[in-house]
Amino acid sequence: MDLQKQFEEAVTNSKALSEKPSNDVLLQLYSLYKQATAGDVNTDPPSNPFDFVNKAKHDAWVSIKGKSKQDAMQEYVNLVNTLKG
């Protein structure tokens, strides 16, 4: 199965995990998904200093800037497979 199909399957599987992952893992999933689908971060950080959730999401995405879309897809697939375990 090619990486794109594995990634799409992992995205579907991530929505049906038996247990909700920790916030750190959710941020990791988010950042890998965004990097795999949109590439390097292309938005400004939230302007509201109290928007902690979106700031954390933005920071997580920024933290993997430069990672190739293929690497991000593979890491996402691996992480979801670990969570399914």
Image: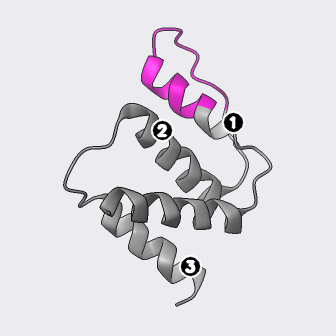
As measured in the structure, the alpha-carbon distance from the residue carrying label 2 to the one carrying label 1 is 11 Å
Pair 2/1: label in front:
2
Q: Earlier in the sequence, mark 2 or mark 1?
A: 2
Q: Earlier in the sequence, mark 2 or mark 3?
A: 3
Q: Amino acid at mark 2?
A: Leu
As measured in the structure, the alpha-carbon distance from the residue carrying label 3 to the one carrying label 1 is 23 Å
Callout 2: 10 Å neighbours few (<14), some, many (20+)? some
In the rendered image, which residue does mark 1 sit on? 62
Q: Residue furthest top?
A: 49
Q: Is residue 46 magenta?
A: yes
**Which of 31 and 1 lies nearest the eye of the viewer?**
1
Q: Amino acid at mark 1?
A: Val
For mark 3, give the secondary structure.
helix
Marks 2,3: beta carbons within 8 A: no
**Which of 33 and 48 lies nearest the eye of the viewer?**
33
Q: Is residue 56 magenta?
A: yes
Magenta residue span: 44-59
Q: How many marks on residues?
A: 3
For mark 1, give the secondary structure.
helix
In the rendered image, which residue does mark 2 sit on? 27
Q: Residue furthest right?
A: 66
As measured in the structure, the alpha-carbon distance from the residue carrying label 2 to the one carrying label 3 is 21 Å
Q: Amino acid at mark 3?
A: Gln
Callout 1: 10 Å neighbours few (<14), some, many (20+)? some
Callout 3: 10 Å neighbours few (<14), some, many (20+)? some
